[in-house]
Image (cartoon, rainbow, N blue to C red):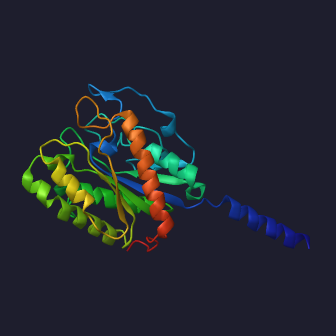
Amino acid sequence: MLPFMCLVLLLAGAYASTPKEKSIIILAGQSNMSGRGGVHNTTWDGFVPFQSQPNPSILRLAANLTWVQARDPLHKDIDIHATCGLGPGMTFANRVLHKDPGLAPLGLVPCAVGGPMGTKISEWGKHMFLYKQLVNRAKAAREAGGLIRGVLWFQGESDTVNEVDARKYKRRLMNLFGNLRVDLGSPSLPIVVVAITSGQGPYVETVRKAQLGIKLHNVSYVDAKGLPLLQDKLHLSTPAQVRLGKMLADAFLTQQHVTSPSNNISSP
């Protein structure tokens, strides 16, 4: 009887020590997703509000593809040609786990790149560097033990400069989402799009209309219009990023409640 009980205890201990699969969230887009909250004259003020504080259950995939505890600036080793500050990611993650602790541990995969000039949607085409980096990082995160549960996309400010870019934005964004779902083997991958509130040119409303007009399965949006900006009138302030993180979390959780994770197809 004793050997049997020892076997039961050993099996129970092994089960308890097995790491739980991570809930992976991809953060993609340009500077406002990367985060410029608290950045003034190329210097980040270092202020982290309580909504964005580190949490042992929130991890970040670093540039070298290792998991580390997440903390702002989340994109400091990804968006390397600019000063990164506070973005929406940590507030998003903390709110998600507060409302649904069963999603822990949460693995954030920063992929947004703004740099000094921003990035157009055309730079996220299937054969472009930014797209390939996104897919490679997403696959590496999954192979390390996780399930990709969603993508947060915040980009478009750079496409407001040229009318042709603005008018082609909708088709290019839909192609991006389609390519991403195919390459990650997840035809119903949940995606939350942020409708921009600012831009580098005069075609902000054209791009916004494109973003708000996308009608794809499991693609929802939140509207950043009206959130406070920094003095540059382009980047969201720290309070705005906190508000946006909460909006993204609520939209993501709504999607999770109406659909089950669909990307449990293994990588080819």
Relative to residue 120, is residue 70 drawn left or right?
right
- Residue occupying image coordinates x 84% and y 67%: 6
Image quarter where the C terminus lies is bottom left
Relative to residue 166, is residue 240 drawn left or right?
right
How many labels were placed on the picture? 0
Image quarter where the N terminus lies is bottom right
- Residue 124 visible in the current orientation: no
Q: Residue 15: which quarter of the image?
A: bottom right
Up-down: is 115 above or below 135? above
Q: Residue 193: which quarter of the image?
A: bottom left
User: In the displayed image of the protein, which residue is found farthest to the right?
Assistant: 1
User: In the displayed image of the protein, which residue is found farthest to the front?
Assistant: 226
* Closer to us: 7 or 201: 201
Residue 45 percent location from the top left of the image: 38, 26
- Residue occupying image coordinates x 20% and y 46%: 157
Residue 221 percent location from the top left of the image: 34, 57
Residue 162 percent location from the top left of the image: 8, 49
Q: Residue 219: which quarter of the image?
A: bottom left
Relative to residue 214, is residue 56 drawn left or right?
right
Up-down: is 102 above or below 218? above
* Closer to us: 85 or 126: 85
- Residue 94 visible in the current orientation: yes
- Residue occupying image coordinates x 43% and y 28%: 47
Residue 84 percent location from the top left of the image: 33, 36
